[in-house]
């Protein structure tokens, strides 16, 4: 049986205003039987959760965080980012995922989510989505609309566990 894997990206150092939303996204993805590789992004204690996930209590440098996140992105079958809070890290993770085919890795469907009225979405994200059909950029209003978007994305791009 192949495990379906998801990377859920969200701001940590840029602000945690959307933490409850990120937790909700993770819960929906897990309900659909995905292993969320990036549980730390939806954790109240992201560093501790990261260390538990890696199994390496010494993986605390900036390079460790970047390298582990990149490995998880490379292993992910889908990539979901909550982008309401601007974050350089989420932008770098998005771009790493988008460029996986150039690294001779499988193309990975991407979903970028932002809450209506919160923040301003970068043209770097919006412009790419116009050209690449596997990248969805969607505005949500509440948890109900968020769930509907997630379910549609997972039904469109999700892989059945074999």
Image: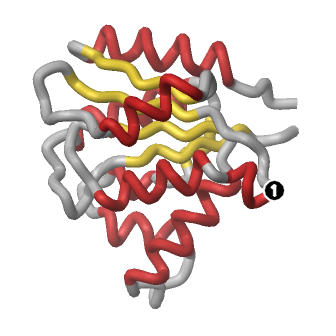
Q: Position of residue 46 (x, y in %)?
A: 32, 63
Q: Is residue 106 above or below residue 153?
A: below
Residue depicted at x 55% and y 74%: 67
Res. 31 image quadrant: top right
Q: Is residue 37 above or below residue 2?
A: below
Res. 88 image quadrant: bottom left
Which one is nearer the viewer's eye here, 152 or 110?
110
Q: Which residue is mark 1?
A: 104
Quadrant location of the N terminus in the rendered image: top right
Extreme-bottom residue of the structure: 58
Quadrant location of the C terminus in the rendered image: top right
Q: Is residue 68 above or below residue 62?
A: above
Q: Position of residue 104 (x, y in %)?
A: 81, 56
Which one is nearer the viewer's eye here, 108 or 12?
108
Residue depicted at x 39% and y 58%: 40
15 on left or right of 157: left
């Amino acid at each position: 049986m192949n495990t379906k894997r998801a990377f859920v990206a969200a701001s940590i150092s840029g602000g945690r205003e959307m933490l409850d939303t990120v937790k909700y996204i993770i819960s929906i993805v897990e309900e659909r039987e995905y292993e969320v590789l990036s549980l730390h992004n939806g954790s109240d204690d992201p560093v501790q959760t990261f260390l538990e996930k890696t199994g390496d209590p010494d993986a605390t440098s900036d390079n460790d965080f970047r390298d582990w996140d990149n490995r998880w992105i490379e292993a992910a079958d889908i990539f979901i980012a909550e982008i309401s809070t601007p974050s350089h890290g989420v932008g770098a993770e998005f771009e790493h995922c988008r460029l996986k085919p150039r690294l001779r890795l499988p193309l990975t469907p991407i979903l970028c989510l932002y809450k209506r009225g919160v923040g301003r979405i970068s043209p770097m994200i919006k412009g790419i989505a116009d050209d690449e059909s596997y990248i969805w950029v969607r505005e949500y209003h509440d948890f109900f609309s968020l769930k509907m978007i997630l379910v549609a994305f997972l039904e469109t791009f999700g892989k059945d566990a074999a």
